[in-house]
């Protein structure tokens, strides 16, 4: 009677996991959600050969590390609303920074709001939601948070003339290494964020209620206003250019982002770059890469301080930790900088999940598993890579996954039209991959990203058009083997694509073109077949079922 056990047992186990019947105990675990800003996976635990990130690497060695996680739109506000509601941009109707989803789209329950409704004390530090209209000028308080969110006072100086040039004059530069003691208030925003996060952890120790603490770091977002000493980790003479620094010959104009936010900084303005392609002089490119990497190491130190405090307070055994980012950032690949595109360098993010007793064994009494590592003094070798997962996943998966790991009621899957449904998910529960990371990864997993444009031609507002100016939407599918993108007409009034209004396409076969530099769309009838079959939004589950990896291979 057990001869078919191997066939049905995985299905049964997956069902039971989704119902949380394998919970380790009945104690509700805390959540510590660490969110970097504009961080691509330039980390040691993602095999980056340059960046020094010992504290995040240490966390990764005790965690499940998702190597292929992707954002749903490569810009801060839309991405954050997307993963905090587990809805895609076509459902939140947020493609810029200028609307509040509860008013403009639907009264969607957020990740912290769901935990708050289940008895958690929910706390926000720094940049979690995007500030301003996109979060109702309140970071969605009081819906999402138990107390008003904290914002560091020194952030108001972030874009002011606080960057000292060699001649002693002050400017608002892109490259802005500083002596912290000379800064207004004598500190920097992420240092203040770290201090406040530690204070909140201390206040919650011994609380009867579990906590959900989200900490949003501001780095490595521009400007690169960081302590000057971090540049010493990356001598500019050791820096290299991006492996593919030229604009691909077959890249459609509509797919290119002209990095207008960088151009507004005074040190970049002084370069007198042509629009839209530049290019930036090679010596300045090397400095941008140096400052980005240094910003990552600076942010890593803040992560290390918070995890060290969690350890010292005896909270590590009772806390799920998530580390991620809102999207990536181009460092000269394709002749592009910043985010604002559908390429991997803009959409791929780190995603690291620690669940005590699951991703690593419980530490012995008194054992510290997250001691702070000073990147300037560390002689420790590379950490293990933790439990790696190669399957393609998405940021919208975080909400249902955390809910499952914490033992809360599972979220139901959203129907194709869910504007009137307050609580559901357009993502997937990854708990099974966290508990069984060595299971063979699915080659039929997909991520879906999108990016708006105002025109086929490259304009000043191509990077970040207001909703009223959007005329084209680029919908992109990323699998293990390919990235496929179509640019189609878009109606901003109804937030609807017109799939019959085709503008351009991209197809990259990743085995032979991992950098996505050789667009094969016009060379394969198969790409046009995919387009004509309507294999694009509404980003519904039927789309995932409709696209078959084997079928795609078969028509190439």
Image (cartoon, grey):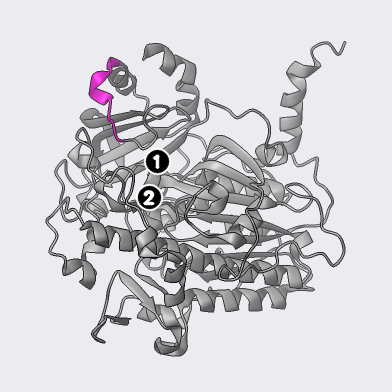
**Residue visible at 46% across and 36% down in the picture:** 447
The image position of residue 115, as x and y in percent, is: 65, 58
Q: Nearer the viewer, residue 289 or 328?
A: 289
**Residue visible at 21% across and 41% down in the picture:** 254
| Earlier sequence position, callout 1 versus callout 2 | 2
Q: Is residue 95 visible?
A: yes
The numbered mark at residue 463 is none
The local secondary structure at tag 1 comes to strand
Task: Note whether 126 is above or below 25 in the view shown.
Answer: below
Mark 2: few/some/many CA within 10 Å (<14, 14-19, 20+): many
Q: Which residues are magenta?
A: 517-525
Q: Is residue 110 left or right of residue 346?
A: right
The local secondary structure at tag 2 comes to loop
Picture quarter containing residue 234?
bottom left
Pick out the residue farthest to the front. 237
**What residue did someone put label 2 on?**
74
Q: CA distance from mark 1 to mark 2?
A: 8 Å
Asked if the residue under mark 2 is in contact with the one under mark 1, i.e. CB atoms within 8 Å, the reply is: yes
Q: Nearer the viewer, residue 366 or 435?
A: 366
Q: Is residue 295 left or right of residue 212?
A: left
Q: Is residue 425 visible?
A: no
The image position of residue 116, as x and y in percent, is: 64, 62
**Residue visible at 80% across and 50% down in the picture:** 361
The image position of residue 257, as x and y in percent, is: 24, 49
**What residue did someone put label 1 on?**
449
Image quadrant where one finds the N terminus: top right
Q: Nearer the viewer, residue 331 or 80?
A: 331
The image position of residue 462, as x and y in percent, is: 21, 51
Q: Is residue 288 left or right of residue 550?
A: left
Task: Note whether 202 is above or below 273 in the view shown.
Answer: below
Mark 1: few/some/many CA within 10 Å (<14, 14-19, 20+): many
Q: Nearer the viewer, residue 350 or 14?
A: 350
């Amino acid at each position: 009677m057990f001869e078919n056990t191997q066939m049905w047992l995985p299905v049964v186990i997956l069902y039971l996991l989704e119902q949380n019947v394998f919970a380790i105990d009945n104690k509700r675990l805390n959540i510590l959600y660490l969110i970097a800003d504009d961080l691509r996976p330039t980390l040691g635990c993602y095999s980056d050969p340059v960046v020094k990130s010992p504290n995040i690497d240490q966390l990764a060695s005790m965690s499940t590390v998702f190597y292929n996680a992707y954002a749903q739109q490569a810009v801060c506000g839309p991405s954050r609303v997307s993963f905090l509601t587990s809805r895609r941009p076509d459902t939140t109707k947020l493609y810029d920074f200028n609307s509040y989803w509860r008013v403009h789209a639907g009264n969607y329950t957020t990740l912290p709001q769901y935990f708050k409704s289940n008895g958690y004390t929910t706390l926000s530090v720094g940049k979690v939601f995007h500030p301003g209209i996109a979060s109702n000028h309140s970071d969605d308080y009081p819906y999402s948070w138990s107390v008003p969110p904290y914002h560091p006072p020194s952030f108001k100086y972030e874009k002011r003339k606080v960057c000292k040039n060699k001649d002693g004059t002050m400017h608002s530069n892109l490259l802005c290494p500083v002596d912290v003691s000379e800064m207004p208030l004598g500190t920097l925003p992420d240092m203040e964020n770290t201090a406040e996060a530690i204070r909140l952890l201390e206040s919650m120790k011994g609380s009867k209620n579990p906590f959900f603490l989200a900490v949003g770091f501001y780095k490595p977002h521009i400007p690169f206003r960081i302590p000057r000493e971090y540049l010493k980790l990356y001598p500019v003479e050791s820096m290299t250019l991006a492996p593919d620094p030229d604009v691909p010959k077959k890249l459609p104009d509509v797919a290119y982002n002209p990095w207008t936010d960088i151009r507004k900084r005074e040190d970049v303005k002084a370069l007198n770059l042509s629009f839209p392609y530049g290019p930036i002089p090679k010596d300045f490119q090397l400095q941008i890469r140096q400052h980005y990497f240094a910003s990552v190491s600076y942010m890593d130190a803040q992560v290390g301080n918070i995890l060290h405090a969690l350890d010292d307070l005896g909270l590590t055994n009772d806390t799920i930790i998530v580390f991620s980012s809102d999207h990536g950032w181009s460092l000269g690949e394709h002749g592009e900088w910043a985010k604002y595109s559908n390429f991997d360098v803009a959409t791929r993010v780190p995603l690291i999940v620690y669940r005590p007793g699951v991703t690593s064994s419980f530490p012995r009494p008194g054992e510290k598993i997250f001691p702070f590592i000073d990147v300037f003094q560390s002689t420790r070798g590379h950490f293990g890579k933790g439990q790696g997962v190669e399957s393609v996943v998405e940021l919208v998966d975080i909400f249902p996954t955390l809910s499952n790991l914490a033992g809360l009621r599972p979220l139901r899957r959203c129907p194709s039209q869910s504007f009137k449904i307050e609580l559901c998910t357009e993502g997937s529960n990854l708990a099974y991959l966290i508990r069984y990371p060595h299971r063979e990864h699915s080659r039929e997993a997909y991520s879906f990203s999108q990016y708006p444009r105002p025109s086929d031609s490259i304009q000043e507002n191509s990077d970040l058009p207001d909703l009223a100016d959007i005329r084209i939407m680029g919908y992109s599918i990323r699998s293990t083997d390919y990235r496929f993108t179509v640019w189609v007409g878009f109606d901003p009034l109804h937030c609807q694509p017109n799939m019959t209004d085709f503008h351009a396409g991209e197809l990259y076969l990743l085995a032979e073109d991992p950098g996505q530099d050789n667009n094969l769309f016009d060379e394969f009838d198969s790409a046009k077949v995919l387009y004509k079959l309507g294999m694009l939004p509404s980003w519904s589950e039927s789309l995932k079922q409709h696209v078959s990896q084997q079928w795609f291979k078969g028509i190439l």
